[in-house]
Amino acid sequence: MSENIHIEALQGVGQIVAGDNVGEIIINSAQETDFTFNEQDILCVASKAVSSAENNVIRLDEITPSDLAHSLHEQIPRKDVRAIQAIIDATGDPSGSRLEVKDNYIGGWLPNGLFLTSAGVDKLTPEELILLPKDAALSARHIGETILSHTGVNVGVIITDSEGRPDKRGSAQIAIGTYGVPPLRTSEATLEDGKVKRNEETICDMLAASAAMLMGQRGFNRPVVKISGFDYTFDTNAKISDALVESKALRTE
């Protein structure tokens, strides 16, 4: 188990816009700021930066709210009815059965089995919403492979997103896509009665939350944070779905 972990934010990233190559931007910014990469470093990258580059943005005036969206708006008047429709659409189920609504809170199960507040839909400008990357794992892979091609170094990549809870104010960062980093860490401990207890930790979320201490929220302009010294086995076959409750993935067949 790692005893010393170093966390460092990449400076000088600048504003990321549609069409940008996030991996190339990371490389260029690193060269300008003496930001180095070592084997098994982990880069946590904010989902909003990735979505901006991939142009996963929708204008509110392009959304036509359904009857369900209008009904939910009566329960959650703070949410623009068009934003509610975008949340419904993000779950992949127009019936609303994959939504969780309580008091002033709305969350949604995404088609891949992830659960996020507002189904990951966020306001970008007064006229626009920003959605999650269409395939965060693929986005993470592209970033990792770009860095490998430039540096010869394998780094793990975690795409992070802010997540609120219905029982707490504020938000924390969680992982929504990974490359090279196994999302779970397992261990065993022998109890006093001799029984062996198997422990399972969602390590990808713990790493994302650690990076968030430097990353902050949108506006801090620190969308990339490096974690060094964490002991893990780099695995290109590891995927976020390894940590998800399979029954919540949307069946499409």
Image (spheres, helix red, strand yellow):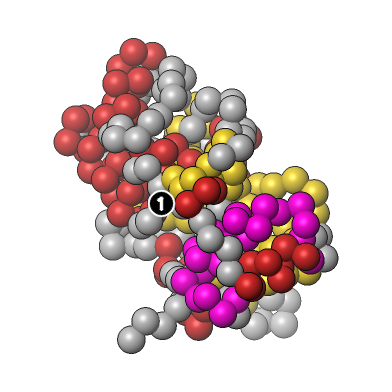
Q: Quadrant of residue 224?
A: top left
- Rendering coords of residue 78 (x, y %): 76, 52
Q: Residue at x 35, y 20 (%)?
A: 29
Q: Determine whether the residue tagged by mark 1 lies in a helix, strand or loop.
A: loop
Residue corresponding to mark 1: 133
Whether residue 67 sits left or right of residue 143 in the image: it is right
One can see residue 53 in this view: yes
How many C-alpha atoms fall within 10 Å of the one at disc 1: few (<14), some, or many (≥20)?
A: many
- Rendering coords of residue 135 (x, y %): 36, 57
Does 93 appear in magenta?
Answer: yes
Q: Residue at x 35, y 35 (%)?
A: 18
Please state which of residues 6 and 100 is positioned toward the viewer in this rendering. Answer: 100
- Rendering coords of residue 199 (x, y %): 59, 70
The segment highlighted magenta reads: 75-96
Whether residue 234 sits left or right of residue 202 in the image: it is left
Q: Residue at x 75, y 45 (%)?
A: 170
Whether residue 224 sits left or right of residue 179 in the image: it is right
Kind of residue at badge 1: Pro
Please state, as top left, top right, bottom left or bottom right, where the C terminus lies in the image. bottom left
One can see residue 44 in this view: no
Q: Quadrant of residue 86?
A: bottom right
39 in relation to 98, above or below: above
Please state which of residues 34 and 71 is positioned toward the viewer in this rendering. Answer: 71
